[in-house]
Amino acid sequence: MTPEDVPAPADLRPENAWIHASWGGAAGLAGSGHAWAAFAKGRILSAACTHFLGSAYEDIAVVIVPGRRRERLAPACVARLTADIQARGHTASWCCSRDNRRGPGTRGPVAPVPA
């Protein structure tokens, strides 16, 4: 994602807007250099970003808009983000609540590997 993409995360439904909260909003996320997204007609279909940035670890967050699951968009975004995280010399981390049955399925095919 680039600063020019600001309208897309700003246009996310309220239930998905949490994805840019840790960056101070849509502009912060788009300009962070820590996010990848799949787009169609200027709208985000799936996005993965560093949600919490530490000195050695980056915790990943992912959203997928309803109706676009099973298209492998989220794993593609996570794979690109994970490659960036490793290139920065950091380790990607990911946690899912017990109630999030979809999270492990998204993560599974592209599980981060420590550098």
Image: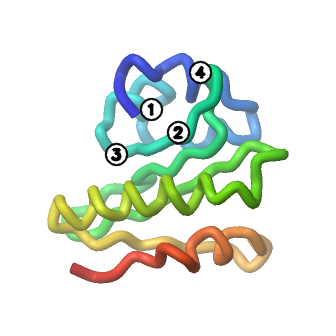
Q: Residue at x 67, y 30 (%)?
A: 12
Q: Earlier in the sequence, mark 3 or mark 1?
A: 1
Q: Secondary structure at mark 4?
A: loop
* Residue of label 2: 21
Q: Secondary structure at mark 3?
A: loop
State which quadrant residue 105 falls in.
bottom right
Type of amino acid at the residue the image marks with label 1:
Gly
In the rendered image, residue 64, in percent from the top left (x then y), is placed at 68, 49
Above or below residue 56? Residue 50 is above
Quote the CA–CA distance across marks 4 and 1: 21 Å
- Tell which tag, 4 or 3, sits nearer the viewer: 4
* Residue of label 4: 42
Quote the CA–CA distance across marks 2 and 4: 21 Å
Q: Residue at x 61, y 52 (%)?
A: 73
In the rendered image, residue 76, in percent from the top left (x then y), is placed at 51, 57
Quote the CA–CA distance across marks 3 and 2: 13 Å
* Residue of label 1: 24
Quote the CA–CA distance across marks 2 and 1: 5 Å
Do tag 3 and tag 2 residues touch (Cβ < 8 Å)? Answer: no
In the rendered image, residue 39, in percent from the top left (x then y), is placed at 58, 33
The quadrant the C terminus occupies is: bottom left
Type of amino acid at the residue the image marks with label 2:
Ala
* Residue of label 3: 34
Do tag 4 and tag 1 residues touch (Cβ < 8 Å)? Answer: no
Do tag 2 and tag 1 residues touch (Cβ < 8 Å)? Answer: yes
- Tell which tag, 2 or 4, sits nearer the viewer: 4
Q: Residue at x 57, y 79 (%)?
A: 108
Quote the CA–CA distance across marks 3 and 1: 13 Å
The quadrant the N terminus occupies is: top left
The one of 52 and 29 positioned closer to us in this rendering: 29
Question: How many neighbours does mark 4 have within 10 angstroms: few (below 14), some (14-19), or many (20 or more)?
Answer: few
Q: Earlier in the sequence, mark 3 or mark 2?
A: 2
